[in-house]
């Protein structure tokens, strides 16, 4: 089936711009946090002239090589996680789902997958009601529950894949 054979486009879906921007902002915060954590651990090692114990004793304050290693590894992990999150968010900018008269198309940056209605074995729709994770404790009940929909499409002869 080709894009022209989809027929009249009835609906078009794409990720919300606010969610994509929020993902990029969170990715940038992870990168900055990782840089700060790694920087503090390197600064602690440099200020001591490299004369650090392997581990600090209980009640003792300051850096040790173990703490420098753990903080450095966590910082690098945060930076890598931030880059991966930004890369993933950028890939979602081009994601679209177009529902036509004769089927639907999943459009990504480098591919278009067109599925005719007769190729579909089943569709499972799940409604998920959640409160935004902005507030904690009793205050979270001040915000309304928001519904998100998840569609699981089973194509004849293929494994199911989620479509949001």
Image (tube, helix red, strand yellow):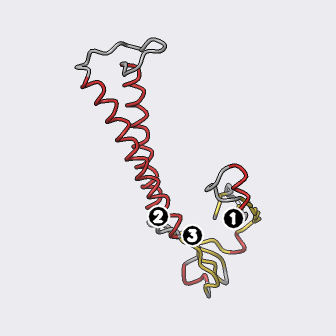
Residue 15's image quarter? bottom right
Seen in the image, is 79 located left or right of residue 98?
left
Kindly identify the residue that appears in the image at 43 percent across and 61 percent down. Answer: 90
Name the residue at the bottom extreme. Answer: 8
Choose the circle earlier in sequence order: 3 or 2: 2
Q: Quadrant of the C terminus?
A: bottom right
Residue bearing mark 2: 21
Disc nearer the start of the sequence (2/1): 2
* Residue that numbered label 3 is attached to: 106
Name the mark nearer the viewer: 3 or 2. Answer: 2
Return the x and y of residue 40 as percentages of the image width and height.
Answer: 33, 33
- The Cα–Cα distance between marks 2 and 1, rounded to whole angstroms, is 18 Å
Numbered mark located on residue 51 in the image:
none
Could you say whether the residue bearing mark 2 is in a helix, strand or loop?
A: helix
Relative height, residue 80 to residue 44 (above, below): below
Q: Nearer the viewer, residue 118 or 60?
A: 60
């Amino acid at each position: 089936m080709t894009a022209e054979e989809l027929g009249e486009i009835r609906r078009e879906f794409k990720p919300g711009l606010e969610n994509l921007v929020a993902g990029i902002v969170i990715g940038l915060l992870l990168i900055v946090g990782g840089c700060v954590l790694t920087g503090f651990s390197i600064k602690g090692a440099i200020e001591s002239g490299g004369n650090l114990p392997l581990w600090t004793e209980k009640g003792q304050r300051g850096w040790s090589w173990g703490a420098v290693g753990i903080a450095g590894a966590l910082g690098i992990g945060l930076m890598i996680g931030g880059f991966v999150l930004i890369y993933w968010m950028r890939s979602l900018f081009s994601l679209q789902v177009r529902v036509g008269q004769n089927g639907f198309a999943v459009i990504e940056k480098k591919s278009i997958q067109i599925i005719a209605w007769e190729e579909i074995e089943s569709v499972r729709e799940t409604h998920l009601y959640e409160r935004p994770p902005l507030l904690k404790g009793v205050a979270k009940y001040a915000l309304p529950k928001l519904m998100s929909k998840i569609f699981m499409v089973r194509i004849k002869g293929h494994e199911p894949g989620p479509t949001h």
